Amino acid sequence: MFFKRLYVKEHAHAAWPHRVPRLARVREEGLKAKFKAGAKVVDVRRCVDFAKGHFPGSLNVGSASRDFALCIGFFFSKEDQLLLVADRAEQAQHARLELYGAGFAKVEGFIEASRLAKLHRLTQLNVFDLKSTLSRGGKPEILDVRSNDEWKSNGIPRSKNIPLAQLASRVSELSLSKPLVVVCQNGYRSAVASSWLQGCGFDSVQHLLGGMDAYGTAPLNEYVEELAIV
């Protein structure tokens, strides 16, 4: 019986590409129109590429992570119409299959990022600059989006903890008028949070590259290279 159930599950998973139609390409004008009508835009590229230029209001969730669909579910409903921004068609189709498997059935189309003309940028901060600011007495607003236990174990002093899963319901606790540095363990969750906050009108968001993994190992007097987080 166990082997039968396993076979059925694996067979069903293998059949997804055949049951799910390939994604249609959309033009930038169509993307804008659908977004204005209420569709959600998910950029599935790496955070460093998203930061260099992205569709205004899009949510950055890198598709290479096993938490891809989970993180999208923190902000969007499975009933929402989704549109994807990707580096290439294969990346978008892979993301679409992952979303389909997680119950997001309304993924309606995609566009390659290279075809976007109107782009926004997201500031990325390396840990050397943050440590330098703190050592000089600077007191930037720091939001840690890890779990409460993670934050308690090694959070940056005076940082505020709102786990990523609670951010949408607790966003009113943050100030729109103050610059905000967003932190997590390795940079993935903070990239998601930073993109969502920017889309909500937080124009002075800074995403900490490498997160606490980089912050905890970087000495103050050495320059830290930017980290390409998936």
Image (tube, rainbow, N blue to C red):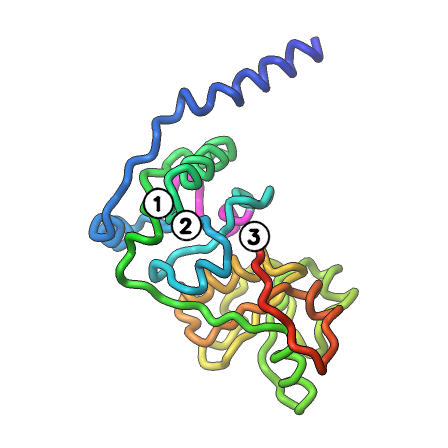
According to the image, label 2 marks what residue?
Answer: 42
Label 2 – label 3 distance at C-alpha: 15 Å
Which mark is first along the chain, 3 or 2? 2
Left or right relative to 6: residue 82? left
According to the image, label 1 marks what residue?
Answer: 83
| Membership of 21 in magenta stretch | no
> Residue at point 38% right, 63% down?
53
Identify the image quadrant of residue 163: bottom right
- Above or below, 204 against 112 in this view is below
The magenta span reads 71-82
The image position of residue 216, as x and y in percent, is 74, 69
The image position of residue 116, as x and y in percent, is 29, 56
| Labels 2, 3: front one | 3
Whether residue 46 is visible here, answered yes or no, is yes
Identify the image quadrant of residue 136: bottom right
Q: What is the residue that sits farthest to the bottom in this orientation?
A: 136
> Residue at point 69% right, 78% down?
222
Label 1 – label 2 distance at C-alpha: 6 Å
The image position of residue 142, as x and y in percent, is 60, 75
